[in-house]
């Protein structure tokens, strides 16, 4: 017997209500899929990080390769650092001296064309782009409150957080570090499919400027500010303000979902040589082939140590992380022999070392090694250059 029209209408309304409720409570299926398919060697499994957005590159001259054989002492040092890297789960190592490649080796099937996952080295690019936005007038200064660009923060404890606080990792935002809890902020930032919503929802737990606390959400919020201030999506801004200017090849960034937001605290996929370009740009104080790409004053500002953690600048590591820096993970047994040396850092020992006094740039990529000392490769090469007089 057919239902009366009124009953059918009520049943339809009930079904619609159930469907809406299901959508509201439906789990993030990408979160679940990423959790159950997480690779055993997660850093270099580039194809797992889907979807991705293109960072358009440019056709520029290749990096020059040194035409001469190095002195015997420097050649021996280059072989020693290559052996050190090879024994420690590396997939690539590149050394530039005086603007030329003097060592380039790959392992585990990688080569010059392979994209590598930079992990948190990407944070330093965010810092560079904030400087670009300041130079263009889209952002007034790092002293500005984040709330000037994020109205969601105009009331409450987060209203006093400045861009400087985000850059120096002293925002006071909650920092849930667990990588196994499904409710952890870090887990949701990493494998969730709405990174902006997650980042903007993280509360303050202490006043800004009191404690150094390395926190991925700071970098994500900076990218939100960058996009809102410039009106340009992060992949395009990175491409047009930095990547193409140094002749880098097309790269890509990880998105939270199709046509969504880039995860800017990690995960730019680019070649070893293009990360060497970034290192050389920094060594040259922001100048590439005679053209100023990054304001040297901004780079100097980035390299100014935090008053709360002297190994860290504005989204860049300004010295080796030795045991006398108790607020950060120790990664080196000794300081760099170059007092001006600094580095970009990514999980699993993704590294770009910049040693201006000795005109050296070193890039290492790979999975997490069991035993690593950040001082070994830079200091081995510096010692050889010093003793050989090269």
Image (cartoon, helix red, strand yellow):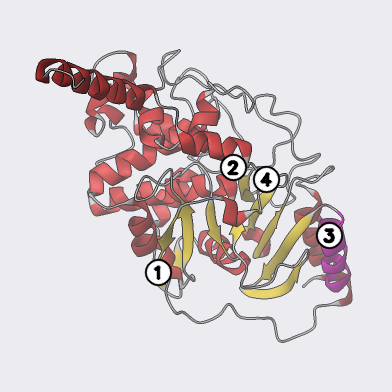
Q: Which residue is mark 2?
A: 317
Q: Which residues are magenta?
A: 74-87
Residue 200 placement: quadrant: top left
Disc number lying in front (3 or 1): 3
Residue positioned 41% across, 14% down in the render? 207
- Horizontally, residue 160 falls left or right of residue 85, namely left
Choose the circle earlier in sequence order: 2 or 4: 4
Q: Which mark is residue 245?
A: 1
Label 2: how many Cα within 10 Å (few below 14, some 14–19, many 20+): many
Contact, CB < 8 Å: mark 2 with mark 4?
Answer: no
Disc number lying in front (2 or 4): 4
Residue 317 placement: quadrant: top right
Real-space CA distance between mark 2 and mark 3, rounded to the nearest whole angstrom? 24 Å
Q: Which residue is mark 4?
A: 39
Q: Main secondary structure of the magenta part?
A: helix
Disc number lying in front (2 or 3): 3
Q: Which residue is mark 3?
A: 86
x, y percentage for residue 357?
65, 59
Residue positioned 45% across, 43% down in the render? 263
x, y percentage for residue 235?
38, 56
Choose the circle earlier in sequence order: 3 or 1: 3
Choose the circle earlier in sequence order: 1 or 2: 1
Disc number lying in front (1 or 4): 4
Up/down of 216 relative to 17, above or below: below
Label 1: how many Cα within 10 Å (few below 14, some 14–19, many 20+): many
Real-space CA distance between mark 3 and mark 1, rounded to the nearest whole angstrom? 32 Å
Label 3: how many Cα within 10 Å (few below 14, some 14–19, many 20+): some
Residue 9 in view of the camera: yes
Residue positioned 75% across, 67% down in the render? 109
- Horizontally, residue 343 falls left or right of residue 335, namely left
Up/down of 215 relative to 80, above or below: above
């Amino acid at each position: 017997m057919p239902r009366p029209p009124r009953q059918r209408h009520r049943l339809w309304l009930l079904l619609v209500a159930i469907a809406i409720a299901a959508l509201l409570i439906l789990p993030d299926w990408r979160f679940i899929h990423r959790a159950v398919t997480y690779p055993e060697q997660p850093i270099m499994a580039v194809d797992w990080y889907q979807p991705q957005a293109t960072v358009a590159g440019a056709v520029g001259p290749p990096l020059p390769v040194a035409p001469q054989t190095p002195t015997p002492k420097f050649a021996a040092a280059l072989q020693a650092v290559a052996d050190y890297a090879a024994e420690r789960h590396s997939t690539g190592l590149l050394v530039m001296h005086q603007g030329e490649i003097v060592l380039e080796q790959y392992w585990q099937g990688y080569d010059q064309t392979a994209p590598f996952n930079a992990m948190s080295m990407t944070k330093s690019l965010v810092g560079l782009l904030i400087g670009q936005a300041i130079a263009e007038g889209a952002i007034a200064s790092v002293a500005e409150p984040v709330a000037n660009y994020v109205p969601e923060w105009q009331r409450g404890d987060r209203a006093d957080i400045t861009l400087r606080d985000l850059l120096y990792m002293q925002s006071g935002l909650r920092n849930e570090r667990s990588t196994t809890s499904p409710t952890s902020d870090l887990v949701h930032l990493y494998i969730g499919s709405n990174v902006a919503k997650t980042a903007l929802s993280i509360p303050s737990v202490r006043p800004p400027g009191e404690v150094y606390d390395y926190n991925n959400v700071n970098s994500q919020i900076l990218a939100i500010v960058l996009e809102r201030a410039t009106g340009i999506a992060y992949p395009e801004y990175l491409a047009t303000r930095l990547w193409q200017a140094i002749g880098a090849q097309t790269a890509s960034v990880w998105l939270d979902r199709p046509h969504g937001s880039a995860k800017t605290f990690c995960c730019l996929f680019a070649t070893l040589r293009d990360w060497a370009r970034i290192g050389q740009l920094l060594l040259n104080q922001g100048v590439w082939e005679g053209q100023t790409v990054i304001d040297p004053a901004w780079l100097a500002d980035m390299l100014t140590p935090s008053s709360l953690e002297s190994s860290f600048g504005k989204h860049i590591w300004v010295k080796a992380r030795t045991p006398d820096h108790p607020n950060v993970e120790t990664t080196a047994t000794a300081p760099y022999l170059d007092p001006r040396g600094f580095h970009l850092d990514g999980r699993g020992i993704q590294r770009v070392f910049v040693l201006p006094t000795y005109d050296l740039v070193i890039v290492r990529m790979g999975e997490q090694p069991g035993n690593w000392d950040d001082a070994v490769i830079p200091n081995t090469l510096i010692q050889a250059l010093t003793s050989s007089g090269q």
